[in-house]
Image (cartoon, rainbow, N blue to C red):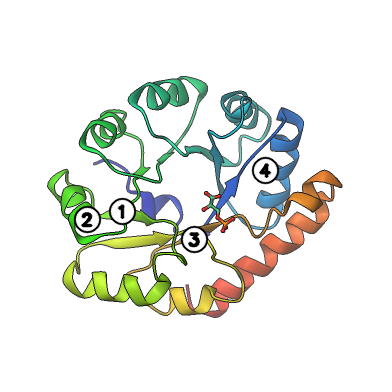
Amino acid sequence: LKPSFSDLVKNSPILPVLHMESIEEAVHVSRALYKGGITCAEIVLRSPVALDCIKAVRKQVPEMTVGVGTLTTPKQVIDSVAAGAQFLVSPSLTRTLATAMIKTGLPMLPGTVSPSEITQALELGITEVKFFPAEQYGGIKTIKALASVFSQVKFCPTGGVSLDNLGEYFANDSIFAVGGSWMVPKDLIANKDWDAITLLSEQAIAAIHKLGR
Ligand code: 3PG
């Protein structure tokens, strides 16, 4: 049986979105997140060193489960698997892209925000999706409305999620995890304040456990 995305994040249902500018940064941030109790990290393909960062984290922080984000082409899927990505995330869903993602056999999370996109996901056998950009697309209100129609679908809202609105999201059963970058603020990375990133991660995990998740 193919591992599901929700299995991957079962123990720490937070998917940090990492926009990394160097290998050193990626290794330190991954260690800091893991120390704070977050066991998965999504490195986004929005910097020229993203694939090298995935490779380095696999090697130097083997305890962290590291995946790739911002996938938009099948070629990127292939390159990411070659770099060692352990899961695949995309902001979008097309038949071409999703088929390439499915082919890898890795846990995958394509992005959908509308009924038609969700139907397209279901046609491909996908029931776990990213909802991005979450706040801009109506946040939990929109997800609730979608979930009432698509009860078999589980969502990972990402974009504008923070400690302030975590509770609203996790109060709904259709949410299996949330994604975001609030625990890896740019200024802390610039100051190499890895301990502060660990602290923010601990806070996030504690808040989620307090909600019974
Ligand atoms: C992103 O793609 O950058 C993520 O959605 C992160 O969003 P956030 O910075 O609002 O958490």
Q: Which mark is residue 112?
A: 1
Indicate which label's residue lies in the foreground, 3 or 2. 2
Displayed quadrant of residue 190: top right
Which of pointers 2 and 1 lies earlier in the amino acid sequence?
Answer: 1
Q: What residue type is labelled 2?
A: Ile
Foreground residue, 207 or 156?
A: 156
Instruction: Say few, some or many: other residues with alpha carbon within 10 Å of mark 3 (under 14 / 14 to 19 / 20 or more).
Output: many
Q: Residue at x 35, y 35 (%)?
A: 106
The response on whether ligand 1 sits within 8 Å of label 4 is no
The residue to which callout 2 is attached is 118
Indicate the secondary structure of the residue bearing disc 3: loop
Which of pointers 4 and 2 lies earlier in the amino acid sequence?
Answer: 4
Which of pointers 3 and 2 lies earlier in the amino acid sequence?
Answer: 3
**Picture coordinates of residue 153 (x, y %)?**
24, 62
Q: In this view, does 2 lie to the left or right of 163?
A: left
Foreground residue, 138 or 51?
A: 138
Foreground residue, 200 or 1?
A: 200
Q: Is residue 27 left or right of residue 138?
A: right
